[in-house]
Image: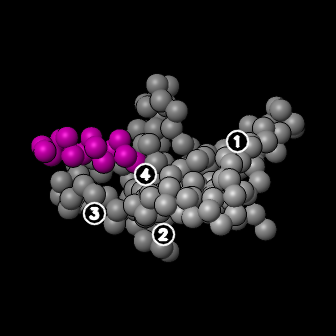
Amino acid sequence: MKQQDIQFEVFRRIADAGALTTRRIVRECGPRPNWQGALDRGALREVHTVYGPVLALTPKARERMAPRFDLPYLAGPSALADRAYQMDALSLLEEEGYTLARHEYKRSGGVGRQAGTTSQIVRTVLRVPRRIEAQLEQDWGFVYAPRFDAISGASPEVLGYPALPPKK
């Protein structure tokens, strides 16, 4: 793969996710010199957080891409770190066979049906791997998909669909 292709792949992954850890990009896309050009050109920025460095789009790159694509809007270091580490955790769970059912997002201004959401993920609902689902069905009965409540923007936890973090 050419260096320019690697840089584009890194940019695409980060744009899709909102933010990713530098460690994950190195693991999946190769050493830093392969994609350093995206940082040098100002398409990506690296933010050093308490948890380690994370990569995100620069405001300039986000502005240029936003009219054509629905990109997550994450600006502060803590929001970037949260998203990057959520994506790392999700990747590890997907390797174990879990699949993403949906993300639930923080609500923004407005009341009732007028309320929108931000790009901040507050909860992720997963579906257990098929082998675990089969065991749950054998032990407890049928596994039904959770019903999403459009008003509250959430759904109850049900057998076979754990939520991270779980509701308290």
- Label pair 4/2, CB-CB below 8 angstroms: no
Q: Which residues are magenta?
A: 1-14
- Residue pointed to by mark 3: 27
Name the side, left or right, on which 119 lies relative to 110.
left
Classify the position of the C terminus by image quarter.
Answer: bottom right
- Residue pointed to by mark 4: 56
Residue type beneath disc 1: Thr
Q: CA distance from mark 4 to mark 2?
A: 12 Å
- Residue pointed to by mark 2: 49
Tell me residue 75's x, y (percent).
55, 51
Element type where label 4 sits in the image: strand
Q: CA distance from mark 4 to mark 3?
A: 17 Å
Please state which of the two labelled residues, at mark 3 or mark 1, is closer to the viewer: 3
Front-most of residues 114 and 79? 114
Residue type beneath disc 4: Ala
Tell me residue 42's x, y (percent).
33, 45
Q: CA distance from mark 2 to mark 3?
A: 19 Å
Name the side, left or right, on which 11 lies relative to 139.
left
